[in-house]
């Protein structure tokens, strides 16, 4: 299993930008290539961030997100998320950029992941109460995590490693969150926002 020198990682782009997405995909492929995976394993990872700021997109990068996958010994990845990737069992997320951007910069282990999930649920609930309906912020379809994949992508996570922390270290801050109240895990804190901030955040999430 490969050990990434976390101290060597630098910010390379905003969440969902082409440079950051390429970096995340590249490390995902590198980690899978170094892992002792079953030869018949079929699994894919994809994340699509909907409604990102226009500055993050270009003619060559018109959809924010990235993927990596293993299909019976063949490992690949990139930012052009293919139908082959989406058709494979695994983890496929399609989420509003504004909803998950800021907290993705936070470093954490398994307990931090649990806390982030709880805080994001609170954010959804508070937005629903404010709006009077449940906002469509995206979701994850039938997540499937084989044990060899979990072991590979979370290797060293309690010591600051793992794919999430690699991605977090490479992510630069996005200006939309300047002055916005957030939780310990970096999740936007809707209950502490001024009314103008609530409206701006709702717009950022394209709700």
Image (cartoon, helix red, strand yellow):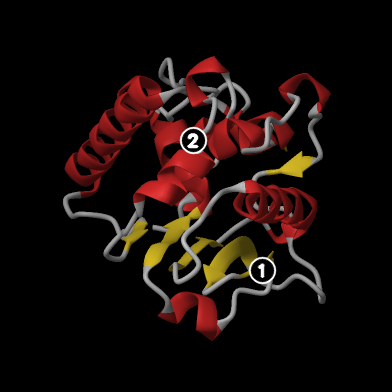
In the picture provided, is 124 more to the left or to the right than 46?
left
Please tell me which residue is depicted at 77% across the width and 19% down the height of the picture: 7
Decide which of 102, 74 is in the foreground and name it: 74
Decide which of 181, 40 is in the foreground and name it: 40
Question: Visible in this render: residue 94?
Answer: yes
Task: Please give the count of numbered marks on the rendered protein.
Answer: 2
Decide which of 202, 144 is in the foreground and name it: 144
Name the outermost residue toward the bottom. 83
Please tell me which residue is depicted at 43% across the width and 15% down the height of the picture: 184
Q: Which secondary structure, mark 1?
A: strand
Which dot marks residue 154? 2
In terms of sequence position, does the residue under pointer 2 or pointer 1 come before the other? 1
Q: Which secondary structure, mark 2?
A: loop
Q: Which residue is mark 1?
A: 76
Q: Is residue 201 above or below residue 137?
A: above
Question: Visible in this render: residue 201?
Answer: no
Whole-percent x, y for residue 103 in the image: 50, 32
Decide which of 145, 67 is in the foreground and name it: 145
């Amino acid at each position: 299993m490969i050990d990434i020198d976390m101290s060597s990682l630098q910010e390379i782009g905003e969440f969902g930008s082409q440079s950051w997405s390429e970096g995340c995909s590249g490390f995902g492929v590198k980690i899978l290539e170094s892992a002792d995976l079953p030869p018949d394993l079929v699994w894919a990872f994809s994340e699509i961030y909907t409604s990102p700021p226009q500055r993050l997109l270009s003619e060559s990068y018109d959809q924010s997100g990235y993927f990596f996958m293993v299909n019976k010994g063949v490992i690949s990845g990139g930012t052009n998320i293919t139908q082959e990737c989406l058709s494979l069992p695994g983890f496929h997320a399609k989420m509003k950029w504004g909803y998950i951007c800021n907290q993705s910069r936070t470093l954490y282990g398994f307990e931090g992941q649990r806390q982030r999930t709880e805080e994001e649920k609170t954010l959804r609930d508070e937005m629903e109460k404010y709006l009077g309906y449940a906002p469509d912020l995206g979701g994850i379809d039938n997540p499937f995590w084989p044990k060899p994949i979990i072991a590979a992508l979370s290797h060293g996570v309690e010591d600051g490693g793992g794919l999430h922390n690699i991605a977090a270290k490479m992510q630069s801050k996005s200006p939309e969150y300047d002055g916005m109240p957030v939780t310990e895990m970096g999740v936007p804190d809707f209950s502490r926002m001024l009314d103008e901030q609530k409206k701006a955040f709702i717009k950022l999430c394209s709700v």
